[in-house]
Amino acid sequence: MDLGYIFSQLLMGLSSGMVLFLISSGLTIIFGLLDIPNFAHGVLYMFGAYITYYFVSHVVDGGFFIGLIAATVSLAFLGALLEVLPLRRIYQSPHALQLLMTFGFILILEDSAKFLWGAAFKSTKTPALLAGSILLPGARDFPVYSVFIIICGFTVGLILWLVLYKTKLGKMIQAGRSNKEMLSALGVNVPRLYTVVFMIGSALAGLAGGLASPLIAVSIGMGDAIIITAFAIIIVGGVGSLLGAFVCSILVGELNTFGTHFMPGLAMIFTYILVIVVLLTRPEGLFGKKLQ
Amino acid sequence: MSESKPRTRREFIKTVGGVAALAATGNLAIPRFVNAKKGSIKLGQIMTTSGIMAGQGIPGMRSAKIAEEIINKSGGILGNKLEIIQEDDELKPDVGVRKFRKLVLEDKVDFVFGTNSTGVGLALVPLANEFGKIFISTSMGDEFTEKNCSPYIFRIGESTSMASRASAYCMCEREPSVKKWAGINPDYIFGRESWAWFKKGMEEKGAKIEIVHEAFAPFGAQDFKPYITAVIESGAEGVFTSAWTGDLINFIKQAKPFGFFDKIKAFVNNTTADAVAMGLGDEMVSFWGEARYYPFYNKNEVNKEFLRLYQEKYSTYPEADVGAECYATVMALKAAIEKAGTPDTKAVIKALEGLEIEVPEGKKWIRPEDHSGIDEVVLLGKFHKDPKYPFWVYDPKTYFTVPGKELAVPLSQSVCKMKKI
C-alpha cells in the first residue's frame, strides 16, 4: 500500500463522509430544535432519490440537475405537510409516541413509493458531465462524481453554517434550542419556526437522496440502510451540532473506507465502538452542548 | 399505578388455563382428512417484500399469484380452491420463523414455500420438521438437501454449488486466458459458499489459475468503492461475484468510473443477473451472468404463457428469476397433490419424489434421494445490448449450458441421510 493509494482512499473516505453529512445534517437540525428523533428521515432520503430518478429517466438534457432541485423542493413541501398536519400535535408527547408516528410515516411513504414506482430496483445514470474519472497524484483513478459530492458537501455545510450563525432565522433556531418559551415570549412565531426547520431538514434529506442516487441502486429500502448510521453520527457528533455532524460524518466515512482494508468483515464495528465510547464518556456528543 | 395482577387466584387460574387450552389446540396434530375434497388447499409463502431486497421478493409473490389464478380458473386442485397466503420475512430469520408459525398455526396452511435468502430459509427447516409440514425452499442453499435434508424439506431449483461450479466451467471454456482471479462476495453463507464452490469448480476442470484477491463485503453494503479499488490494485484479470441485485447494481455503478470493466477481462456473477440488467437499464455493462430462470432462453408453451400473463397483469417482464421458481413450486405442488390424490403431507412427499414437470425454465425433476430440484440445464450468457428490449439481454451466441444432472452433487458424495417417515 503506497502513498498514492492511501491518498486515493482518504479522498474516497471524504466523499463517502460527505454523503453521510448531507443525510445527517438534516437529521441533527430537526432533532436539535424540535427534539424529535425523525426516523422517517431515511424514507425522505429515499423519496428524494426516486424523484431524481424520475427526472433523469424522463428529461434528456440536464435531467439530473433538474431532478436534484425537484427533489429538494418537493421534499421541503412534503416535510411541511408532515409537520403541519400530524407531527406538530405530538411535540409534547413522550419520545416513544413520536417514534411511533415517524415510523408510521415510514410505512406510508414506503408503500406510496412502491405504488408510484414499483418494487424493482431503479438506477439513476450519472450525468455525462460528471461521469468518468480524474487521475490523482499517485497515479490512481478517482471518479469525477465523487469530487462533485465532496464539493456539494462542503457547499451545503457552508450554506447551513451561514444560515445558522449569520441570519436572523439561524439565531432563532439556536435560541429555540435552549429556551423555547422565552423565544415565544419575544414574539417569535415558534410553530412556524418549527415548520421551517422541518422543511429544511426534509429538503436536505431529499437533496442527499438525489445526490446519492447515481451511486447506489434506488430501492424502497434504501432509507433503512442509512438511517441507523445517520443516528450514530449525530449521537457521536452531538445532537443539534452542525459541526458535529460534519466532523463525525467524515470520521465514519474514513473508518468505513480504511476499515474495509484492514478488517473487511468488521469495518462497521468501528463506528459502533465509537458510539459506545462516546455515550459512556461524553454523552452529549463530541461537539454537543453539555446536558443540563 | 395500574393493577396488573389478577384480583383473585380463581381469575388467575382461569386466565392461565384459557391460554394453555388455546395453545394446546394450536399444537395438537389435528387429524387430517385423508379424503381429498375439503374446500380449499392453503399454501403459505414467505418472501422478502420490504427493505433492500424487496425487488427480489415481490416477483416471487406476483408469480405465485399468477399460478394461483391459472389453477383456480381451471377448477383448482382436486376440486379444491387454491389459496396462497403471503408473508414478508423482512430478510430476517427471526421474522421468517414468526411468519412460519403464523401460517401454520393461525392460517392452517397445508404447505409452506419460499424465502429469497438462504439464511432465512435455513431458520425455517427445524420448524417444518417440528410441525410436520412440507417446506419447499426457493433459495439456493445446498444445505436444504445436504446437512439439513429431511423428508419435509425440498429445494425447487439450483443450489449455490451448482450455480457457482457452472460459472467456473463457463469461465474455463469461454475465458481460458484469464488466469488471475479475484472474488468479491457478500459476507454470509451464500457469498462464502459461492466463492468456495467457484474455486472448486475451477479445480475440477484443472484450470491453472491464481487467486490474487478475495474479500467479503457486508451483505447490503452501500459503498463498494474500497473493494473495487482493492481489486484493481491486486492486478486481477477476472472477477467472480455472488453479490446479487441491489449489491451488484451498487458495485457496477460504483466501479464504472474507475474504468473497472476495461481493466478486468472477465466478470462473472452466479445469480439473478437478469434482475441486475433490468435494474441498470442502459447503464449496464457486459459481463457473464447466471440466473435460475432466463425469460428468453426457453421457448416452451408454459414459458410463453407465464410471460404473457406476467406482462398482462404487471406490464413488465418478471423482475427476478426467483419468480419463476415460485411459479414452479406451486405447479409442482399441484402436480404432486393430484398424483397423490390427497393433500395429506406424507402422500404428497412421496408424490413429489421423482416428479418431473414442465415449467417456464424447462423440465424440472425432483431427485427422490435428497429432494433436489434439478433443471434440464444451468444457463450462463454474456450480456449485450439488444434494441428489441429495454434492458440488456444475453447474447444468444454466448449461451453456455451444463446439464443439471451433471452439476447436482453426486449422490455418492452427498451427506444427506433421509429419514423415513
Image: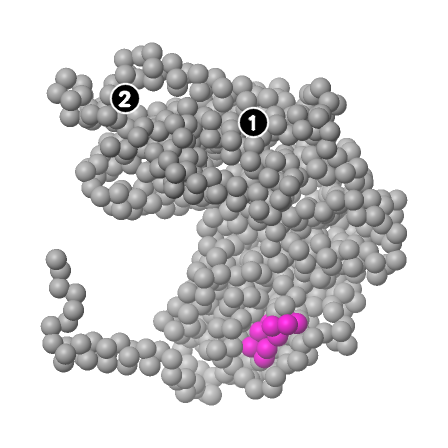
Magenta segment, principal secondary structure?
A: loop
Residue extending farthest to the front is: A281
Identify the residue at image location x=15%, y=22%.
Answer: A182
Give the x, y percent position of residue B148: 60, 72
Magenta span includes B147: yes
Query: For the residue labelled by badge 1, is the local secondary structure a helix, a strand or a loop?
Result: helix
Which mark is drawn over residue B151?
none
Magenta span includes B189: no
Pointer 2: what residue? A173
Judge left or right: residue A193 versus residue A181.
Answer: right
Closer to the camera in the image, A144 or A118: A144
Segment tinted magenta in the rendering? B145-154
Name the kind of residue labelled 1 in the image: Leu
Residue B137: image quadrant is bottom right
Name the subunit of mark 1. A
Identify the residue at image location x=57%, y=43%.
Answer: A267
Quadrant the C terminus of chain B occupies: bottom right
Identify the residue at image location x=70%, y=29%.
Answer: A5
Name the subunit of mark 2. A
Q: Are marks 2 and 1 in contact (CB under 8 Å)?
A: no
Which mark is drawn over residue A14?
1
